[in-house]
Amino acid sequence: MDTAPALDSVFSLAGRRALVTGGIGAAVVARLVEAGVAVTLADLDTDGAATADRLGATFVACDVTDAAQLGAAADTAAGDSGLDICVNNAGIFPTTGPMQSASDDFVARMLEVNVRAVFSAAREAANRMPNGGSIVNMASIAALGGGAGISAYSASKAAVVSMTRAHAIELGPQGIRVNAIAPGVIDTPGVQAQLEPLRASGIDIDKRIAANPLGMAGQPDHIARGVMFLVSDLAAFVTGQVLVIDGGATA
């Protein structure tokens, strides 16, 4: 029987190189840098440059819907030795509104950013993983069940789940693991802004955000911790899976 490797070795990420795109990226970048990873943060928002500088990462201005820009960002992240980790965070926030009034242009944009760009980023990352690696796509609990007013978003995130499983099968022989995380409601400025109209009607937004069995408001770092597990060798036999991090909201 093979001897199991020491815990510190299966959790160590020192010396690895990662590409992280937008979204809840700052928390993920912070944890990866803390673990010794050379991180490139690719984001359309150039304010991300200050975030990357503060966290000790490299920043690349990147529109994830532009495959050429994604390729350039992946080249920067890979350096001369190749890429080890790709975390696809970038995406458009959920509110669609009543499906009867959602325009085709809106739906097309949602799918362009949340599906096609994730596909492109995974492709560019995989092409720069000569020694294998780990790709983590950001899905949502909206992919696992319906919800009024978020139909286009739900469809896009369901596509991410399906894509994750398909890519895991295709890339497994190259030593590349592909998984997804499905966050629940996470307390971010974007979520607060989305729910702000409810405050006027007397609804306690903070209570709504923490409406899960644990009674906790989900934080970006809760998602980052899930990423850390999936990209480490602790998850060496985990691929094609969706890790739900929602405080038990979908239990």
Image (spheres, rainbow, N blue to C red):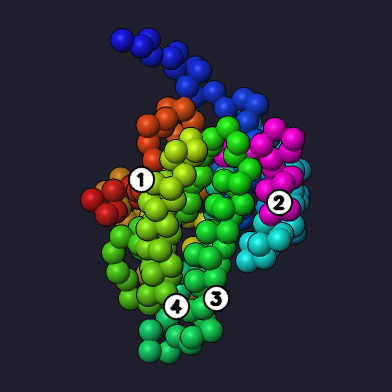
Q: Which residue is mark 3?
A: 109
Membership of 165 in magenta stretch: no
Q: Secondary structure at mark 1?
A: loop
* SS at circle 2: helix
Q: Calculate the distance from the C-alpha at mark 2 to the C-alpha at mark 3.
A: 22 Å
Residue 107: percent from left, percent from top: 48, 79
Q: Is residue 79 magenta?
A: yes
Mark nearer the N terminus (3 vs 1): 3
**Which of 72 and 7 lies nearest the eye of the viewer?**
72
According to the picture, the residue beneath numbered tag 1 turns out to be: 241
Q: Residue at x 43, y 14 (%)?
A: 5
**Which structural element holds mark 3?**
helix
Closer to us: 20 or 46: 20
Q: Which residue is mark 2?
A: 73
Residue 152 location (% of width, % of height) = 42, 74
Mark toward the start of the polypeptide (2 vs 1): 2
Quarter of the figure with the N terminus: top left
Residue extent of the magenta highlight: 71-85
Q: Neighbour class for label 3 at 10 Å: few (<14), some, many (≥20)?
A: some
Marks 4 and 3, how far apart at CA:
11 Å
Please provide percent x and percent y for residue 72: 73, 53
Q: Which residue is mark 4?
A: 96
Q: Is residue 223 above or below residue 96?
A: above
Mark nearer the N terminus (1 vs 4): 4
In the figure, residue 99 lies in which quadrant? bottom left
Mark 3 and mark 1: span between their CA atoms? 26 Å
Tag 4: residue type? Thr
**Circle 1 crowding by C-alpha within 10 Å: few under 14, some 14–19, many from 20:** some
